[in-house]
Image (tube, rainbow, N blue to C red):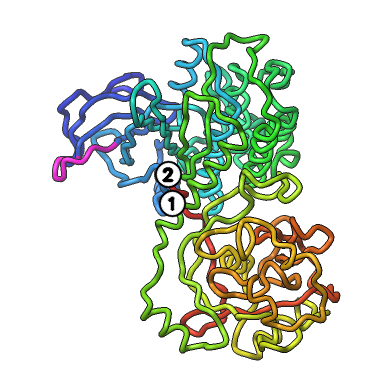
Amino acid sequence: MTEQSTQNFATGDVIAKKYEIIRYLGEGMSAWTYLAKHIASGKELVVRFLRPTLVADQKDRERLRQLFERARGVRHELLTRYGELGVHGDYIYHTEEYFVSESLRDIIDAYVAEGKAFSLQEACQLAISVLEAVEIAHNAGIIHRNLKPENVLVHTKRIGPAANAKVIRTVKITGTGLAGVLNPTILADSFVSREDAPYLAPELTGFDEDCGPQADIYSTGVMLYELLCGQRPMGTYLSPTQLREDLPEHVDDIVEIGLAHNPEDRYPTARDMINDIQRSFSLEMQSGRTKVSFRNILVGLGVAIVVAVGAGAWVITSDKPDPVAEARKQDDLVRRTVQTQNPPPEDALMIAMGKRHPEMLYVPGGTYVAGRYGSEATDAATSSEPLRMVIKVPSFFIDRYEFPNKPGAKPATRVTWDKAEQACTAMGKRLCSAEEWEKACKGPGNTVYAYSDDYNQACGAEVSDDYTLGDRKDCASSYGVYDLSSGLREWTSSLDPQKGNRKMVKGGLRSNAVRGTRCAFTVDENSGFSEASLGFRCCLNPDGSATTAPAEPAAAPAE
């Protein structure tokens, strides 16, 4: 067997006495890939045989082993799973999950062949799915280093009559964590003459082994540009709005930041780029501009896309709905599905929990819809706020009222974050996280305000620091928690992810009560700050511990 061979194995060949080759899938810079069947279980999987020159000595093989073990430990639905690392004859191989799909390269090529263009929404959702996948890897300390359309796998499912079929697409990223098996010199040399070169971050072309998350952000930026413009950015490239009249100007900024030559000029994290793309999507939804043809590339009929709610999954329809109506439809879909996924707990459980801490309310664990809704008016919710996302929060207890949590008392004000934390700790409790606060506010129905979706002036307009706890019985959330959308601003235990040690404060903005009393509204303050409109309340874990249980993104519901 020689390394120059394209297909080293034939259908029916048995590998390591475990796997039977079904067919050849292709080759990449580091390996030949086959679809195989696990003989014992009958399950289909992918087998990749590494090029012998990449693992020629013991040091290279040990490097591969370490990379593989690390990558195999990262499990997520957006990443294909690794199986085992083994040896067969002259080859080292590894197995990987077989995901029935086509590559993003196949989809792009099909669009070009048919003269079609990706809509802004579809391109954005594809880019977001890729970024969500690499964010998982980055959080585990793994940089992909070789992102390209061939490594983005897309499963397409059509539902309903052919004429009006809805298309559900699910994305997975393959090859995560193993690009490091390539010596930097081999990587840079190989890319000089390869089609993959435009996706490689500039810092990886200089024979430098070190790179950060920004390398993957660059690669995603190239793919986003290609989806929007029908071509890859080469040299001094034209901006997307120079090639398409139907794109918002903010898209140019996203591309420019994502494709910055210096890593430090790109988005610091995948999440930062996701947020900016979502903002652009929101602006487009609000503008309702009519789609027109490209000026410089072939265009057929575009497809309109509406964001579905799964991590890496979305729905495409052939109709072009009213943006606000479609946003409301998606808001309702998410809320209905999340509500279905979180049935009310048994009465016996609620009664038992209520007896543990009578002064507090038990909030069952599960998912809720965090952030603003797409259909909210712009004077209430701004595009800078995160768009609806499904968050999973463990169960917790929350004080029924603001501190001191006693009906008829006045709420404590002019309290710094440190003093608020000390007060909760002294009671064996803790400050609530921003996610717990918002879940308690939105209630099982995930309403905009604690009391409903519609602003109630009686709850939010004329609030001062001289009211007594329990006065506003009509302003409690569905969980029974008072004054979340009608009381003071409240400290939380959460840090603002963008501003270091500044603490997140929920609720209570009086300069614009329509906006500030929404459950999703958040500002940040220095922990030493205090004023008459700032108070707090406490939370507690069901087991009695006072350590904040982490919230986590959940796979959003699909239609």
**Nearest to the observer: residue 235 or residue 301:** 301
Alpha carbon of mark 2 to alpha carbon of mark 1: how far? 8 Å
**Residue drawn at (36%, 33%), measured in percent from left and top?**
50
The quadrant of the rendering that contains the N terminus is top left
* Residues at circles 2 and 1 in contact by the CB criterion of under 8 Å: yes
- Position above or below: 383 against 198: below
Q: Main secondary structure of the magenta part?
A: loop
- Position above or below: 239 against 159: above
Q: Which quadrant holds residue 352?
A: bottom left
Magenta residue span: 38-45
The quadrant of the rendering that contains the C terminus is top left
Q: Which quadrant holds residue 189?
A: top right
Hey, what amino acid is under mark 2?
A: Ala
* Residue ID for mark 2: 558
The image position of residue 206, as x and y in percent, is: 65, 31
Hey, what amino acid is under mark 1?
A: Thr
**Nearest to the observer: residue 205 or residue 296:** 296
* Residue ID for mark 1: 337
- Any part of residue 212 in sight: no
Classify mark 2: residues with Cα within 10 Å, few (<14), some (14-19) or many (20+).
Answer: some
- Image side of residue 180 versus residue 282, left or right: left
Give yes or no for residue 472 being in the magenta stretch: no
**Residue drawn at (62%, 37%), measured in percent from left and top?**
324
Label 2: element kind: loop
The image position of residue 337, as x and y in percent, is: 43, 51
The image position of residue 479, as x and y in percent, is: 53, 72
